[in-house]
Structures are given as C-alpha cells and as structure tokens.
Image (cartoon, rainbow, N blue to C red):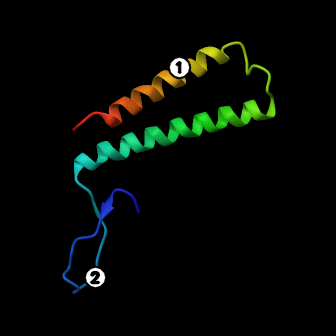
Amino acid sequence: MENTRSPDTGGHGKKTCEPCDDCYNLVQDAANEHRASLAALDALLKQIAKNPEPVGEDFEYKLRKLQVRETKHISTDLRPS
C-alpha cells in the first residue's frame, strides 16, 4: 500500500497502516504525475505502432510538448535536495 507506514510495535500488538508525513505526499504526487506521463507515452507509442502514419496534424507539437515535460521531470528528479 503506497503512502502508508506501519509503526514499529516491537513485535507486540497489531501493526496498522498510518498515513505518511506530508512531505511524502510531494513524492507521491510526483510519482503519480510520472506514471501519467508514462501512460500517455505508452498510449502514443501504441497508436503509432497500429498506424505508422502521422497521428494527426498536431503530432509533432504533442511529441515535442511531451519531450519538454519529461525533460523537466528528469532534471527536477536529478536536482540535489
């Protein structure tokens, strides 16, 4: 289960999942955005595989926009914290 943690009970009692600290939500949001971007890229690649012709008039624009967004995500992820 994402975005939860189990407190250390010292081997006694039942472990329960608790929400993580707020700072983890930032990581979770970034991970969800990354997953959505990967899903969009996967859908685009599948569409290209089925129809290798240009995928609409704005294909080059959409592809470039996706490249810029992913480059931004990568550079943000690699920035020292």
Residue pointed to by mark 2: 14
Please state which amino acid type lies under the numbered disc 1.
Answer: Lys
Looking at the rendered image, the quarter that the C terminus falls into is top left
Query: Which residue is depicted at the point 56% across and 18% down?
Result: 64
In the rendered image, residue 52, in percent from the top left (x then y), is placed at 79, 26
State the image coordinates of residue 4 (x, y, percent, origin top left): 32, 61
Q: Quadrant location of the N terminus? A: bottom left
Q: Position of residue 56 (x, y in %)?
A: 73, 17
Q: Which numbered disc, 1 or 2, marks the residue closer to the eye?
A: 1
Residue type at numbered disc 2: Lys
Q: Look at 66% across and 14% down and name the residue there.
A: 58
- The mark nearer the N terminus, 1 or 2, is 2
Q: Nearest the camera: 58 or 67?
A: 67
Q: Which residue occupies 40% across, 26% down? A: 72
Q: Is residue 52 left or right of residue 15?
A: right
Residue 26 picture quarter: top left
Hey, which quadrant is residue 38 in on the image? top right
Q: Is residue 30 above or below residue 70?
A: below
Residue that numbered label 1 is attached to: 65
Q: Please tell me how crowded label 1 is: few (under 14), some (14-19), or many (20+) other residues with Cα within 10 Å.
A: few
Q: Residue at x 24, y 85 (%)?
A: 13
Which label was assigned to residue 41? none
Determine whether 66 is above or below 43 in the image.
above
Question: In the displayed image of the protein, which residue is found farthest to the bottom?
Answer: 12
- Marks 1 and 2, Cα distance to the nearest angstrom? 49 Å
| Residue 23 in the image, given as x and y percentages of width and height | 23, 46
Q: Are marks 1 and 2 in contact (CB under 8 Å)?
A: no
Instruction: Determine whether the residue tagged by mark 1 lies in a helix, strand or loop.
Output: helix
